[in-house]
Amino acid sequence: MTRVLHPIAGGLAFSLIVVFFSATLISELFGSVEMVTAVKTAIPWGFLVLIPAMAGVGGTGLVRAKGRRGGLLGKKARRMRWIALNGLLVLVPSALFLADRARDGLFDTAFYAVQGVELVAGATNIILIGLSIREGLRLSGRLRPRRTTGRA
Protein backbone atom coordinates (compact mmCIF):
# COMPACT_ATOMS: atom_id res chain seq x y z
CA MET A 1 0.00 0.00 0.00
CA THR A 2 2.83 2.44 0.81
CA ARG A 3 4.21 1.75 -2.68
CA VAL A 4 1.10 3.44 -4.08
CA LEU A 5 0.46 6.08 -1.39
CA HIS A 6 4.02 7.45 -1.18
CA PRO A 7 4.27 8.72 -4.78
CA ILE A 8 0.66 9.95 -4.76
CA ALA A 9 1.17 11.98 -1.57
CA GLY A 10 4.54 13.23 -2.83
CA GLY A 11 3.15 14.24 -6.21
CA LEU A 12 0.23 16.01 -4.58
CA ALA A 13 2.47 17.91 -2.14
CA PHE A 14 4.95 18.86 -4.87
CA SER A 15 2.15 20.00 -7.19
CA LEU A 16 0.54 22.15 -4.50
CA ILE A 17 3.84 23.85 -3.67
CA VAL A 18 4.46 24.56 -7.37
CA VAL A 19 0.91 25.95 -7.70
CA PHE A 20 1.34 28.18 -4.62
CA PHE A 21 4.69 29.44 -5.92
CA SER A 22 3.47 30.01 -9.49
CA ALA A 23 0.25 31.71 -8.42
CA THR A 24 2.24 34.02 -6.18
CA LEU A 25 4.68 34.96 -8.94
CA ILE A 26 1.99 35.45 -11.57
CA SER A 27 -0.25 37.51 -9.28
CA GLU A 28 2.64 39.69 -8.09
CA LEU A 29 4.09 40.26 -11.56
CA PHE A 30 0.94 40.54 -13.67
CA GLY A 31 -2.08 40.68 -11.40
CA SER A 32 -4.08 43.34 -9.67
CA VAL A 33 -4.15 44.00 -5.95
CA GLU A 34 -7.37 41.98 -5.84
CA MET A 35 -5.66 39.02 -7.50
CA VAL A 36 -2.70 39.17 -5.07
CA THR A 37 -5.17 39.29 -2.19
CA ALA A 38 -7.10 36.31 -3.55
CA VAL A 39 -3.93 34.24 -3.98
CA LYS A 40 -2.42 35.15 -0.61
CA THR A 41 -5.65 34.44 1.28
CA ALA A 42 -6.28 31.15 -0.59
CA ILE A 43 -2.86 29.61 0.07
CA PRO A 44 -3.42 28.91 3.80
CA TRP A 45 -6.59 27.00 2.88
CA GLY A 46 -4.40 24.80 0.72
CA PHE A 47 -2.54 23.77 3.87
CA LEU A 48 -5.57 21.63 4.69
CA VAL A 49 -4.42 19.35 1.85
CA LEU A 50 -0.67 20.09 1.78
CA ILE A 51 0.16 19.34 5.41
CA PRO A 52 -1.53 15.90 5.47
CA ALA A 53 0.11 15.11 2.11
CA MET A 54 3.54 16.01 3.48
CA ALA A 55 2.89 13.95 6.61
CA GLY A 56 1.82 11.07 4.37
CA VAL A 57 5.02 11.33 2.34
CA GLY A 58 7.12 11.31 5.51
CA GLY A 59 5.24 8.45 7.13
CA THR A 60 5.13 6.23 4.07
CA GLY A 61 8.76 7.03 3.36
CA LEU A 62 9.77 5.84 6.83
CA VAL A 63 7.77 2.64 6.40
CA ARG A 64 9.26 2.00 2.96
CA ALA A 65 12.83 2.63 4.18
CA LYS A 66 12.43 -0.09 6.84
CA GLY A 67 15.12 1.46 9.03
CA ARG A 68 17.73 1.71 6.27
CA ARG A 69 19.61 5.02 6.25
CA GLY A 70 22.40 4.62 3.71
CA GLY A 71 22.82 5.78 0.13
CA LEU A 72 19.91 7.44 -1.61
CA LEU A 73 17.56 6.63 1.29
CA GLY A 74 19.81 8.53 3.68
CA LYS A 75 19.96 11.50 1.32
CA LYS A 76 16.17 11.51 0.99
CA ALA A 77 15.72 11.32 4.78
CA ARG A 78 18.16 14.17 5.46
CA ARG A 79 16.62 16.29 2.72
CA MET A 80 13.11 15.65 4.11
CA ARG A 81 14.16 17.15 7.43
CA TRP A 82 15.22 20.38 5.68
CA ILE A 83 12.04 20.44 3.61
CA ALA A 84 9.91 20.04 6.75
CA LEU A 85 11.85 22.65 8.74
CA ASN A 86 11.69 25.13 5.87
CA GLY A 87 7.96 24.53 5.55
CA LEU A 88 7.10 24.71 9.23
CA LEU A 89 9.46 27.50 10.28
CA VAL A 90 9.44 29.72 7.17
CA LEU A 91 6.73 28.93 4.64
CA VAL A 92 3.69 28.38 6.87
CA PRO A 93 4.31 31.43 9.10
CA SER A 94 5.10 33.56 6.03
CA ALA A 95 1.92 32.48 4.26
CA LEU A 96 -0.20 33.23 7.32
CA PHE A 97 1.45 36.65 7.77
CA LEU A 98 0.99 37.50 4.08
CA ALA A 99 -2.63 36.35 4.05
CA ASP A 100 -3.37 38.53 7.06
CA ARG A 101 -1.64 41.57 5.53
CA ALA A 102 -3.29 41.06 2.14
CA ARG A 103 -6.73 40.69 3.74
CA ASP A 104 -6.14 44.03 5.50
CA GLY A 105 -4.79 45.66 2.32
CA LEU A 106 -1.36 46.24 3.88
CA PHE A 107 1.05 45.89 0.96
CA ASP A 108 3.97 47.59 2.66
CA THR A 109 7.70 46.97 3.06
CA ALA A 110 7.10 44.19 5.60
CA PHE A 111 4.72 42.44 3.19
CA TYR A 112 7.22 42.50 0.33
CA ALA A 113 10.17 41.54 2.55
CA VAL A 114 8.32 38.48 3.82
CA GLN A 115 7.11 37.79 0.26
CA GLY A 116 10.73 37.71 -0.89
CA VAL A 117 11.70 35.31 1.90
CA GLU A 118 8.71 33.12 1.08
CA LEU A 119 9.62 32.95 -2.61
CA VAL A 120 13.22 31.95 -1.84
CA ALA A 121 12.07 29.33 0.68
CA GLY A 122 9.42 28.03 -1.74
CA ALA A 123 11.93 27.73 -4.59
CA THR A 124 14.28 25.92 -2.21
CA ASN A 125 11.60 23.39 -1.29
CA ILE A 126 10.65 22.88 -4.94
CA ILE A 127 14.29 22.06 -5.74
CA LEU A 128 14.74 19.81 -2.70
CA ILE A 129 11.51 17.91 -3.32
CA GLY A 130 12.40 17.58 -7.01
CA LEU A 131 15.73 16.01 -6.04
CA SER A 132 13.94 13.61 -3.69
CA ILE A 133 11.49 12.66 -6.44
CA ARG A 134 14.41 11.97 -8.78
CA GLU A 135 16.08 9.76 -6.17
CA GLY A 136 12.80 7.98 -5.46
CA LEU A 137 12.46 7.21 -9.17
CA ARG A 138 16.01 5.86 -9.16
CA LEU A 139 15.30 3.72 -6.10
CA SER A 140 12.17 2.29 -7.73
CA GLY A 141 14.02 1.53 -10.96
CA ARG A 142 11.88 3.91 -13.02
CA LEU A 143 14.88 6.16 -13.69
CA ARG A 144 18.33 4.97 -14.58
CA PRO A 145 21.24 6.07 -12.42
CA ARG A 146 23.39 8.80 -13.90
CA ARG A 147 26.38 7.36 -15.72
CA THR A 148 29.81 8.87 -15.48
CA THR A 149 32.17 8.60 -18.42
CA GLY A 150 35.36 8.64 -16.36
CA ARG A 151 36.79 11.36 -18.59
CA ALA A 152 38.45 14.42 -17.13
Image (cartoon, helix red, strand yellow):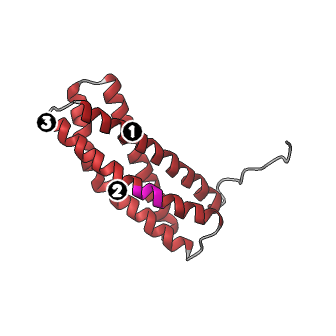
Q: Give the spatial CA distance, label 1 vs label 3.
A: 21 Å
What's the distance in space between the residues labelled 2 and 3, CA to CA? 24 Å
Q: Residue at x 38, y 59 (%)?
A: 53
Report which residue position mark 3 lands on.
104
- Main structural element of the magenta stretch: helix, strand or loop? helix
Task: Judge by depth and name the residue closer to the eye, 54 or 116.
Answer: 116
| Label 1 Cα crowd, 10 Å radius (few <14 / some 14-19 / many 20+) | some
Residue at the spot of label 2: 88
Q: Mark 3: few, some, or many residues within 10 Å (few <14, many ≥20)?
A: few
**Span of residues in magenta:** 81-85
Quarter the C terminus occupies = top right
Quarter residue 71 falls in: bottom right
Foreground pick, 86 / 62: 86
As measured in the structure, the alpha-carbon distance from the residue carrying label 1 to the one carrying label 2 is 15 Å
Any mark on residue 119, and which?
1
Q: Contact, CB < 8 Å: mark 2 with mark 3?
A: no
Residue furthest to the right: 151
The stretch drawn in magenta includes residue 83? yes
Please indicate whether residue 77 sits to the left or right of residue 93 in the image. Answer: right
Left or right side of 111 for 5: right
The residue under the point 56% across, 51% down is 131
The image position of residue 75, as x and y in percent, is 59, 61
Q: Position of residue 25 (x, y in %)?
A: 37, 31
* Residue 50 within the magenta-colored segment of the rendering: no
x then y, percent, for residue 99: 22, 41
Q: Amino acid at mark 3?
A: Asp
Residue 14 horizontal/vertical position (percent): 44, 49
